[in-house]
Image: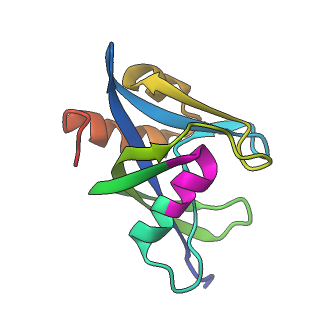
Amino acid sequence: MDEIVRAAGGVVWRRGPAGIEVVLVHRPRYDDWSLPKGKLHAGEDDVAGALREVEEETGLRAEAGRELPSTRYQDPRGRPKVVRYFAMRPTGGSLAPAPPETDEVLWLPINEAAARLSYGHDRDVLAACRDRGGTAD
């Protein structure tokens, strides 16, 4: 059996003029829209990895709040992958893509973000955050 690929990420949110907004990233390698996430480094804690990946992919530093549902799926190489997600509030930095990994990063109202996400498992994570009033922290 293949070893499980461990990853972590976040639903970065803020209160905007029209309500809760979240950050989505566009990954040109897959031509998809997703929540910021990535593989953990060897020995890296899930929360630390989630914060690192969010900053690497979005340019935003954040603080982690409540854990959200994890996702499980096969990666493009057919290996089982588990991604742990955390609600996050931005604490610094500035929103910017990180080529070549991300070529677009956006703040979107939560309902618009849900419609733009490419994967159902990401929509499920976002729904869990929304169901908790967006704050989830």
- Measuring from the top left, give residue 104's x and y in whole percent: 68, 33
Q: Residue at x 19, y 39 (%)?
A: 132
Question: Was residue 53 drawn as part of the magenta stretch in this picture?
Answer: yes
Dominant secondary structure of the magenta stretch? helix
Q: Residue furthest left?
A: 132
Q: Residue furthest top?
A: 18
The verdict on residue 71 being magenta is no
Do we see residue 40 in this rendering?
yes
Which residue shows up at 26% across the image and 34% down it? 134
Relative image position of residue 128 (x, y in whole percent): 28, 42
In this view, the residue in front, 89 or 136, is 89
Measuring 56% from the left and 59% from the top, which residue is drawn there? 53
Question: Which residue shows up at 19% across the image and 33% down it?
Answer: 133
Residue 44 at what x, y percent from top left?
Answer: 50, 80
Q: Is residue 4 left or right of residue 20?
A: right
**Residue 83 in sight:** no
Q: Is residue 7 above or below residue 136?
A: below
In depth, the one of 130 and 94 nearer the eye is: 94
**Residue 113 place in picture, x, y as percent:** 47, 27
The N terminus, quarter of image: bottom right
Near-viewer residue (123 or 105): 105
Figure disc tally: 0
Check the image and tell me how it is coloured: rainbow
**Residue 42 in the image: above or below residue 53:** below
Q: Say above or below: 73 vs 91.
A: below
Which range is magenta?
A: 52-60
The answer to which quarter of the image holds residue 63 is bottom left
Say which of 99 and 94 sits in front. 94
- Depicted 64 relative to depicted 111: above or below: below
